[in-house]
Amino acid sequence: MKELALHILDIAENSIRAHADLIEIEIVESEERNELTMTITDNGEGMDDETLRRVMDPFFTTKTVRRIGIGLSLLDQAARQTGGGTTIESARGKGTRMSARFTLDHVDRQPVGDLATTMSILIGGNPSIDFVLRHDRGNDGFLFDTRSLREELGDVDLNEPEVLSFIAGLVRERRNLSDESVSG
Amino acid sequence: MGKLTIEELRKIREGARKSRDLREAQGKSRITVHMGTCGIASGARDVMDALLKAIETHHIEGVLITTSGCAGLCSMEPMATVEFLDQPPVKYVELDAEKIVRILLEHAVEGKIVEEYALAIGSEKMS
């Protein structure tokens, strides 16, 4: 994986398989702390203690088509390469929260990358799931929430081609769906 | 960074409604793009992006797009599976943006398998 947006696409798949209907993605870049933190939180099935204990093992997976699960260990490796690391909190029936911390100015820190395409693909492939994206770059904050968009779109599905193009543009241009502007 | 206006959202909503009303209610075929770690690392995001854009550009009707995890053939990613009701699924391998668009137009829309990109039909491997 060459960018964090690809890790997001990969890790969100775990949330989808856990039958989450709300997946929250938060990226916080802090020059003050010299740190980038990426957190993915879901309200899926969660993991029992045994699964949680083994989840970083690339040779452990709950999937049945193959015998390795390398997504989380790849992300952990990417974080560790910058002097950071990952933490995972989960409990059966209570969802999962995965947080990866990177040293912001480290030469090996992967770029955030193409969030716009990642979000349009997540939403396009899973229109019944709600996604929240927060990206905080100090003075510049961006928030996208499919729940707000659904309210305005009414009976139009999120995976309609025009809507997906609109979402990609929104994320690419970092245009906030603010209550003030939407409510007129 | 500009703010979104309610007028823009209304235009998007009305435009999408008109397009949707032109399409049939039931999908004729389904394309599943495999988005496991192996697929994503191999370029599945670009494949999916090309597919979604082609559907919009060509005003495709009746093709459902979904994603799934790893299909178990990591060395052949990116992969996609095309399915029609009551027909065996066709698995396509080593895809890129150009190939998936051709698969969309020729197979998912017109029903003609693109054999040069196909690995298997149902459980039968393409020779």
Image (cartoon, rainbow, N blue to C red):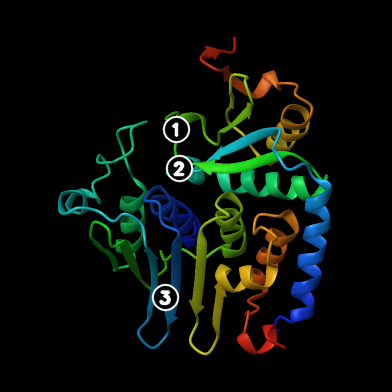
Give the residue at mark 3. A105
Q: Can residue B125 be seen in this view?
A: yes
Q: Is residue B88 above or below residue A109?
A: above
Disc assigned to residue B102: none
Q: Nearer the viewer, mark 2 or mark 1?
A: 2
Residue A96: percent from left, percent from top? 31, 61
Q: Numbered disc 3: what chain? A: A
Give the residue at mark 1. B74
Nearest the viewer among B96 and B125 is B125
Q: Nearer the viewer, mark 1 or mark 3?
A: 1
Q: In this view, does B26 lie above or below A90?
A: above
Mark 2 and mark 1 residues within 8 Å of each other at the beta carbon? yes
What is the C-alpha distance between the residues marked 3 and 2?
A: 29 Å
What is the C-alpha distance between the residues marked 2 and 1?
A: 9 Å
The C terminus of chain B lies in quadrant: top right
Q: Numbered disc 1: what chain? A: B
Give the residue at mark 2. B36
For marks 2 and 1, the one nearer the N-term is 2
Looking at the picture, which amino acid does disc 3 mark? Asp
Kindly identify the residue that appears in the image at 75 percent across and 59 percent down: A162
Nearest the viewer among A89 and B87 is B87
What is the C-alpha distance between the residues marked 1 and 3?
A: 33 Å
Q: In this view, does A36 lie above or below A49?
A: below
Few, some or many residues within 10 Å of mark 2 (<14, 14–19, 20+):
many
Few, some or many residues within 10 Å of mark 1 (<14, 14–19, 20+):
some
Q: Nearer the viewer, mark 3 or mark 2?
A: 2
Task: Give the side of residue A175 with respect to residue A63, left or right.
Answer: right
Few, some or many residues within 10 Å of mark 3 (<14, 14–19, 20+):
few
